Image: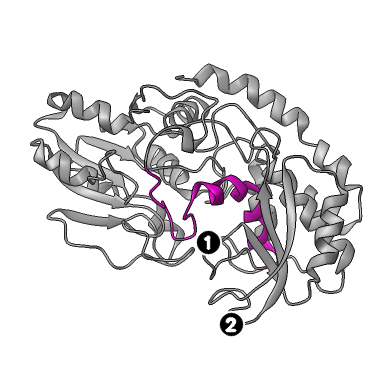
Amino acid sequence: MVATGLEILLRKSNRFQNRNIGLIVNQSSVTPDLKYSWNILKERGMQIKMIFSPEHGLFATEQDQIAVNYQPELGCEMVSLYGDSIESLIPDKALLDNLDLILFDIQDVGSRYYTYINTLALFMEAVSGMELEIVVLDRPNPLGGSIVEGPMLDPAFRSFVGIFPVPIRHGMTAGELALFYRDFKKLDINLSVIAMEGWQRSMLFPETGLPWIPPSPNMPTFDTAEVYPGMCLFEGVNISEGRGTTTPFQLSGAPFIKPDDLAKRCTEYGLEGVRFRPVWFKPTFHKFGGEVIGGIWLHVTNHNLFRSFATGVAMTFALRELYPEHLQFLNGVYEFNNTIPAFDLLAGNSSIRKSILNGCDPMSTLASWENDENTFSDIKQNFHLY
């Protein structure tokens, strides 16, 4: 079984005695026997002075893009790094005056959009030049560390769902991303990573032997994480991404979709490792809450061949082709940005949306980020810890 950075730290807990510690954690920060890090670190005599929680809150009580107000009583100061303004994403330096060590321990899901790694990046920027030490307690990338997918982030589309200049599916752990970002931004920080033991880049999460703790409200299983790099794109269109159901992101749909027609068109693209099952479902909240709508359930049939981002883009092409009078790309505020369409923020560029609207060849678009994938695959090897 894989031993996480938290487990390795606990073997050497004397290293951090007599330090004033702040934690960036949520409910996924657990030992294999499901003890929360903040409790077991206190039991080992460490001085936990402050806990910083990311989007959704310490116990993932809030849905996406909802300010976190409730904080449980844990015997130390609690600070949310996700409020109702973009300023809330950055820690107030006055809060850090009495700290000399920050431990980051949150389970990532392997997609550029997922905001926990972006919280880490912004924290690193905020403390650059300070003597504060940051230690990342590494955890597995649930999607493995080998496959890279999608376009690189265009700097003009930097947002809270796109901070790292990496493809959508980056194939790196949180620790590796932190080392990469320090180098990319030339940050003056005291950063180290406590690496895992037993993790291999070919491993998917079920192979690690670790318990899956849903890191956010709509990430209940590994199966969700596997389809998320592509299906999160539907947050940027008037299609339900399955929020309000028990299988978010695996399910998607809208009132105007005829499931059999959409499944047939998506199948015709010849995408490998996936099948499209036509369904009807009723979200209990979020988009089309309380309505019976038509859609698709994604079934991954081959983990090595499946390309989630390509699948999400191809499905959007199919929706545009079949329902041009209905499909809409959403505008408005998305993760604190009100000037760039949400779809573009997620994709990291505007070219994919424009290709869909202009009726370009889907297969040409899916091949357009191959150079980005190859380039980053070479770059990231410089930061591999495994």
- Say which residue label 2 marks: 290
Q: Position of residue 251 (x, y in %)?
A: 64, 62
* Residue drawn at point x = 45 percent, y = 19 percent: 385
Task: Work out how far the residue at label 2 is from the one at label 1, CA to CA, in angstroms.
Answer: 27 Å
* Residue drawn at point x = 18 percent, y = 23 percent: 12
- Classify 10 Å Cα crowding around label 2: few (below 14), some (14-19), many (20 and above): few
- Res. 340 visible in picture: no
Nearest to the observer: residue 360 or residue 288: 288
Res. 263 image quadrant:
bottom right
In this view, 329 is above or below 142: below
User: Where are the magenta residues, as a range?
Assistant: 211-239
Nearest to the observer: residue 90 or residue 227: 227
In this view, 127 is above or below 253: above
* Residue drawn at point x = 45 percent, y = 42 percent: 108
Q: Where is residue 109 in the image (x, y as percent from the top left)?
A: 50, 43
Q: Where is residue 315 in the image (x, y as percent from the top left)?
A: 77, 55
Kind of residue at disc 1: Phe
Asked whether 217 falls inside the magenta stretch, the response is yes
Report whether 244 appears left or right of 195.
right
- Say which residue label 1 marks: 336
Q: Position of residue 8 (x, y in %)?
A: 26, 26
Nearest to the observer: residue 117 or residue 297: 297
- Res. 175 visible in picture: yes
Rendered image: mark on residue 8: none
Q: Is mark 2 on a helix, strand or loop?
A: loop
Kind of residue at disc 2: Gly
